[in-house]
Amino acid sequence: MSIDLSVMPKLGFGLMRLPEKNGVIDHDHVCRMVDKYMKAGMNYFDTAYVYHGGRSEVAAREALVKRYPRDSFMLATKLPAWEIRKEADIERIFNEQLERAGVDFFDFYLLHSIEDGSNHDTYVKYDCFKWGMQKKAEGKIRHFGFSYHGSPELLEEILNAHPEVEFVQIQLNYLDRTNPVVRSQRLYEILHDRNIPIIVMEPVRGGMLADLGPEIEAKFKKRQPERSVASWALRFVGSLPGVMTILSGMSTEEQMEDNINTFADFEPLADDEFKIVNEVTEAVLSMPQIGCTACRYCVDGCPMKISIPDVFRTINTLRRYPDDWRSKNFYSGLIQRSGKASDCIGCGQCERVCPQHLPIIELMKEASGILD
């Protein structure tokens, strides 16, 4: 069964950055956001085994599965290589996901975060591509693919070996086109040339492209004063042929409304707007920023309980607004409930799971010198 592209919404609801209250997912808030999204005629939800420390799939069950007919929405989740220690773990994790989400099947199922090295090696070792197709034959998976953070060379190798793959999810935004680690432009070209449907993650780069500073944002506002800065990032990706669905990890109803407005009456970028995007890209790349997308994969396994993305967020804000006292005030509050940057013991757990391949240990030393 091939993917019916005509029913795929352009905007997908990513369940990785759900709103929280007192350290737990805010159920009522999530329900309101789900209702608003569904009312807009959109119905693709993306979660994963590891999101929110394993609570995201449960949140999908409570806010979506229990409240809407099963045929009214599409639910995607992912198999994490780093949780697989033996072959039996694959079936155990999958069954746990079905139970957590409260469903009998997943519409889309992905091998999570394939990249050169350990993750890819694990999927190959346990023949997870064959396993995925078996699950599809059993009716437990409707469509099978993978999310990708590796090199263009490995991507081509995988696609040559596995023509059965129906879709691929990649990080794609205007800032990462020339990023030597992400190389999203080349990944996009490979998939587009093969006519493989593309799901986009991190179109706003973890929120970074929604907060660029007054001087840079003025370039967008001069051309489209009524549009948000984030909408430019979404419209850039939505203007690219071959992009099936664009995921946004929305945390507030305001973000939801803005994104729905962007896609409800979608307007591709005009030629002069592409030029503005290129100017903004150059301006942003000239600023020294830590390329963290706040995926939070690093947080759960940190033995010192350091909220690493929030530390990096503080440093990035200080670099952009060096005279703003609120950044250090934010950090003072942060370390009341999590570890300090100086608590880092350099174990490397964070670097092993970072999709952006950041040198986190060295960056934490830098952050400690500034903040502690």
Image: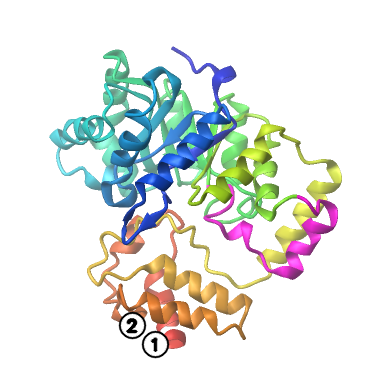
Q: Is residue 40 above or below residue 360?
A: above
Q: Secondary structure at mark 2?
A: helix
Q: Position of residue 234 (x, y in %)?
A: 64, 44
Q: Which residue is depicted at the point 22% across and 68% down? A: 303
Residue 268: mark = none
Residue 342: mark = 2
> Residue 212 magenta-drawn?
yes
Q: Magenta stretch? A: 202-226
Q: Secondary structure at mark 1?
A: loop
Which corner quadrant of the image does residue 22 belong to? Answer: bottom left
Q: Quadrant of the C terminus?
A: bottom left
Q: Which residue is depicted at the point 59% across and 18% down? A: 6
Image side of residue 165 versus residue 260, left or right: left
| Residue 183 appears anywhere in the view | no
Which corner quadrant of the image does residue 260 belong to? Answer: top right
Q: Position of residue 290 (x, y in %)?
A: 52, 68
Q: Are marks 1 and 2 in contact (CB under 8 Å)?
A: yes
Q: Quadrant of the N terminus?
A: top left
Going from N to C along the chain, the mark reached first, 1 or 2, is 2
Q: Position of residue 70 (x, y in %)?
A: 37, 20
Q: Which residue is depicted at the point 32% across and 71% down? A: 306
Three-letter amino acid code of the residue under disc 2: Ser
> Residue 109 magenta-drawn?
no
How has the structure been colored for display? rainbow
Three-letter amino acid code of the residue under disc 1: Asp
**Residue marked by disc 1:** 372
The local crowd at label 2, few if under 14, some if 14 to 19, many if 20 or more residues have their Cα within 10 Å, is: some
* Disc 1 to disc 2, C-alpha distance: 7 Å
Front residue of this view, candidates 17 and 138: 17
| Residue 189 appears anywhere in the view | yes
How many numbered circles are shown? 2
Q: Which residue is depicted at the point 21% across and 31% down? A: 99
